[in-house]
Image (cartoon, grey):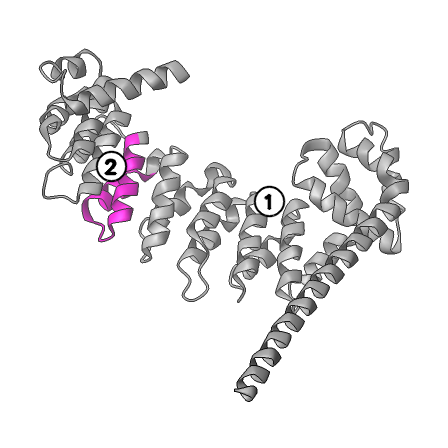
Amino acid sequence: MIVGGALLIGATIAVLGGGLLLVLAVVTVRSRRRSRNQRDQMLLSPLRVPLITVASGEDDDGSAAEQLTWATGVTRTVLDSNIVELLTKIRGGPGDQLIRVLEVHGAVDAAVSDLTHRSSVRRARAAQLLGLARADHTVPLLVEALSDESVEVRNSAAYALGLIGDPSAAGAVLAAIGAPDRGLPAATAAEALQSMGVGISEVLREGMRDDNARTRMVAAHLSGERSFTRGLPELRHLLDHDTDLTVRETAATAIGRLGRDEDAAVLSRHTVPTEPLSLRRACVHALGELGDDTAVPTLAALLDDPDPRLAELAASALLVLGPGGGAALAGHEDDPAVRTARLMASLQKANA
């Protein structure tokens, strides 16, 4: 009994001691961070006025930017860190001036060296800086970083390539999605590719023929987002034949955005009950987006579908297909799907 009580007391003391040490560690970290921030503010203080002048676009003669290039030592390091943060918000002339300051300070060259640093944090920060500095000469290095062992570095490299916007890197970014074990997140790749302009249309067409489903999905999505009509043959093929349901749904959405009149038949044949419900819904919504009135009979037949969401989507599509679509709704005025579709259309019109 006495031994058990002693053990309990010892355990309690150990827990309390551990909690106290944790509190002290948190306080110490916060204190150091506060001290570092105060030091940084003090070092930056003499340069705050020229920094604001450049960032606000008021440095017409370049004298403020020139003053920033004179910073040395720790002050230069703090200044460069602030400039990098500003570059996430500033573009145009002021951004170019700030990038020039980084170049004079050697920050861009240092970032190139840091791309191979043993620390993944340093590598990721280096990639981000190169992107923010629009260092297009480093595109090959950033492409190489897409296969880094660290996902943070891969994401940062894709982010940087998107900022630089060189379409020559589009193929590498798209291919990185399907890289085994070191794949790039689809959303990250899509965001980077969005910034690379019309020069990526052929890369996207090739991507829709890739073996990796995620790569095909991103390529199909971007083809629709960017209205790359040259990719329509590949999109139709994906909708008809792809083995991945998400890819098929993405292709249907893209066809709805950029398809031709003849694509009403392509989408309609995938609204039948033998198709997966999610694909049927995607195709019905796409028919409304396409806006071709030859789809009216197909949509009208779906007003009585057992799935209420599918019936509602069909009613919504008919509402935007002109007189023919409106006529097809006759006799269905009291259907819950039609009433919901009309209500949603009214709300969208009021908010437009």
Q: CA distance from mark 1 to mark 2?
A: 34 Å
Q: Is residue 103 above or below residue 145?
A: above
| Relative to 236, residue 312 above or below | above
Could you tell which of marks 1 and 2 lies nearer the N-terminus? Answer: 1
Q: Main secondary structure of the magenta part?
A: helix
Q: Quadrant of residue 249?
A: top left
Q: Which mark is residue 91?
A: none
Give the residue drawn at x 36%, y 50%.
Answer: 207
Residue 292 appears anywhere in the view = no
Q: Which residue is mark 2?
A: 282
Residue assigned mark 1 = 164
Q: Is residue 328 visible?
A: yes
Residue appearing at x 12%, y 23% in the figure? 300
The quadrant in which the C terminus is found is top left
Residue positioned 71% across, 37% down in the render? 95
Is residue 89 left or right of 330 when viewed as pictured? Answer: right
- Count of number-bearing discs: 2
- State which region is magenta: 231-256
Say which amino acid is labelled 1.
Answer: Ile
Task: Name the residue located 64 percent from the left edge and 54 percent from the top edge.
Answer: 138
Q: Is residue 334 magenta?
A: no
**Residue nearest the viewer, comparing 223 with 185:** 185
Task: Kindly state the secondary structure of the residue where label 1 is placed.
Answer: helix
Q: Is residue 141 above or below residue 262?
A: below
Q: Mark 1 Cα within 10 Å, few/some/many (few <14, many 20+)?
A: many
Q: Secondary structure at mark 2?
A: helix
Answer left or right for 214 relative to 272. Answer: right
Identified by mark 2, the residue type is Ala
